Image: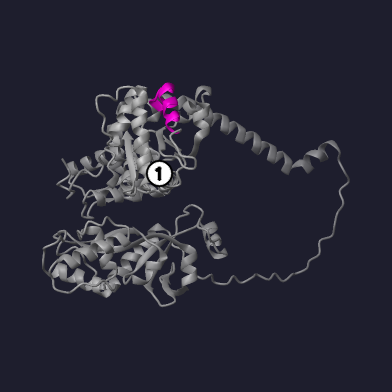
Amino acid sequence: MYTSYFGFKENPFNLTPDPRYLFLSPHHKEALDHLLYGINERKGFIAITGGIGTGKTTLCRALLGQLDDSIKSALILNSFITEKELLETINQEFGIDLDTEASTKKQYIDRLNQFLLKTFSLGGNAVLLIDEAQNLSHTVLEQIRMLSNLETEKEKLIQIVLVGQSELKEVLTSSSLRQLNERINVRYELSPLDRKDVQGYVEHRLVVGGGRGNLKFTDGALKAIYESSQGNPRRINTICDRALLAAYARDEFTISKGTVSKAIKDIMGDGASETRIMDWPRKSVKLTTAFMLLLIILAGLSGWAYRGHILNIFSPKEEVSVPIRNVKEKISVPIRKRQTASLFLDEKSSLAGLFRLCREKTGRNNYTTDNVHLVLFSFDTKIENHGMFKKPFRVLLDRFGSSQSPKSLSTDMASNPTSSIRYLLIREVTADGAIAVDAEGNGRLVTRDFLQIHWGQKVSWVYPYENRNVDLVKGMRGQGVLKVQKTLKKIEYPVEITGIYDDSTFRNIMKFQAYFGLKPDGIVGPQTKALLYQMSD
C-alpha cells in the first residue's frame, strides 16, 4: 500500500529471506566467515544456531550466492522428512540423474558418492545446507552423520551445514547423537543485532528497497524499535512495516517515536497492556524489597558515621581541650589548563558537523528547492581508499581493532561513558593524513598512522539526492552519463568521455562496483552515484 507512496520499488520490510537484504552486522559477518571457512577448509560438519527471526535462512541464501562456481550446493528446507526422502531430495538438489532403478537408500548413496568423487576429481567441492535442522528426527540425523563417511583418505567429499534454532544444540547433546556432535568442527551461535546496528539495518533495507532518501527514522524511533524487538531482525521488520503504514496514513516522511510506539501497540494488541498490569504486583514487591534494603544500608552507614558519639555514651572519656591556633594559611588553588577539544565526536555532533561542512563545501544553504534533498550515505571501505575521497566524511572509530586505543581515546570515552560510539569528522584528505574537525569546529592535522589506528571501515557522507534522478543503464546518454564518465576518468578508469553509456563505460562501472563491494550489475543507481559523488571534484 505505502510502497509507491514512499518511492520504493518493493516493500523493504518483507519477511521473506531475500539475500539482497542481508545486513552484515558484526554477528552476521562472523557467522558468514565461519561458514565460508568451514566449507573452503573442508571441515565436514558446521552448525549455525540462533533464535527465531535472527536471519539464519537469509544468511544461508546469501552464502549460496557467494560460493565459487566449482562448489556444488544443495539446500534442504523441509526438515520433516524420512531418511529415504532426505537422500532423494539431496540427489535432486545436486542435479543427479535418477532413473527408475534408484529406489533404495543404498542406491541413492551410491549415486551421490559417484557424483561427489567426480566433483572432487575436477577440483570442486560440495555443500549440503539443511535449514530448520532442529526438527530432524534422530534417525535422519544419524543418516546425515553416515553421509560424512563419504570421503577420501585426506579430504571430506561433502560439507554439511546444519542450521537451526537454539534447540538444535540440545538435540545434538543427546546420548544417541554423541558421534554426530563430536564431528561438528565449526559452530556459531547467531545473536540479535546490537543497539548501534539497528539504525544501519533499517537504513540498509530502505536503500535496497529503492528508497529515495527522503524517509527518516528519528533516534527516538530507532530506540523504541530496539527496545521492543531486542535486535531481532524479524521483529524489526514487522514493527517498521506497521510504522510505515501509519506514516502513510498520516502523510508523514519522518517516522517518530510516537509512530513506532503506536505500531508496536497495534502489533501486540491488548495483550501488551494486560501483561504490564499483571507484572505490576511483582514489580511492586521488588521495588519495596529494594527500598527496605536501601533504608537498612543507610541506617548502618549513619550508625558508623556517629560511632564515636555512640561509644561515648557507654564508655565516657574526659574531654581534652586543645587550643586552636589563629593562623592564616595561604591556600594555593591550582589553575586548570584549558583542555584541547576532543577529536572523537558523538553521533549528534559529528552529524551536525558533517552537514555544516557539506554546505560550506558546496556554498549552498538551501537544498529544499529543485527536488534536491541532503541524505546520509553510509559505506564500508578500507583506509586504503580514503585518499580518493574529495568530500567531507566521518568514519566510525574502531575501538576494538587489533591496535590498542591510545590514551587520549580512553580518556575521552571515560569522560562520557553514556555513549561509546564515536566518530572522526574529516574535512579533507591530505598527502600524509587528513584534517579532522574537533568538538569546537577547529581543523586539526592527523597523520595516516592515527587514521590507521582508529579506522572502523564504516564511512558516512552527505549526498545531495535529486528526486528526478533515474538509474543510468547501458545505452543511455546525457549530462548524467557525462558526469559519471568524467569521474571514472579522474580516478583512472579507461573510459572515453562521450556522454553515451557504451560498452566501455558499462564494463568499467562493473569493475568499480565490484572493487568497492557493490553489486556489479553495471547500473548506476543511488549507491553507485553516491560513491562517485564522493570521488568527484
Residue 59: quarter of image: top left
Where does residue 303 sit, x and y in percent of width and height?
Answer: 72, 39
Residue toward you, 13 or 121 = 121
Q: Residue at x 49, y 70 (%)?
A: 449
Magenta highlight: main SS: helix
Q: Is residue 294 above or below residue 444?
A: above
Q: Identify the image quadrant of the C terminus.
A: bottom left
Residue 442: quarter of image: bottom left
Side of 401 where 507 appears, left or right: left
Q: Secondary structure at mark 1?
A: loop
Where does residue 220 sit, x and y in percent of width and height?
Answer: 35, 47
Tag 1: amino acid: Leu
Q: Which residues are magenta?
A: 134-148
**Magenta region includes residue 448:** no
Q: Is residue 139 above or below residue 49?
A: above
Q: Identify the image quadrant of the N terminus.
A: top left
Q: Which residue is mark 1?
A: 193
Where does residue 498 sit, x and y in percent of width and height?
Answer: 14, 73
Q: Is residue 470 above or below residue 497?
A: above
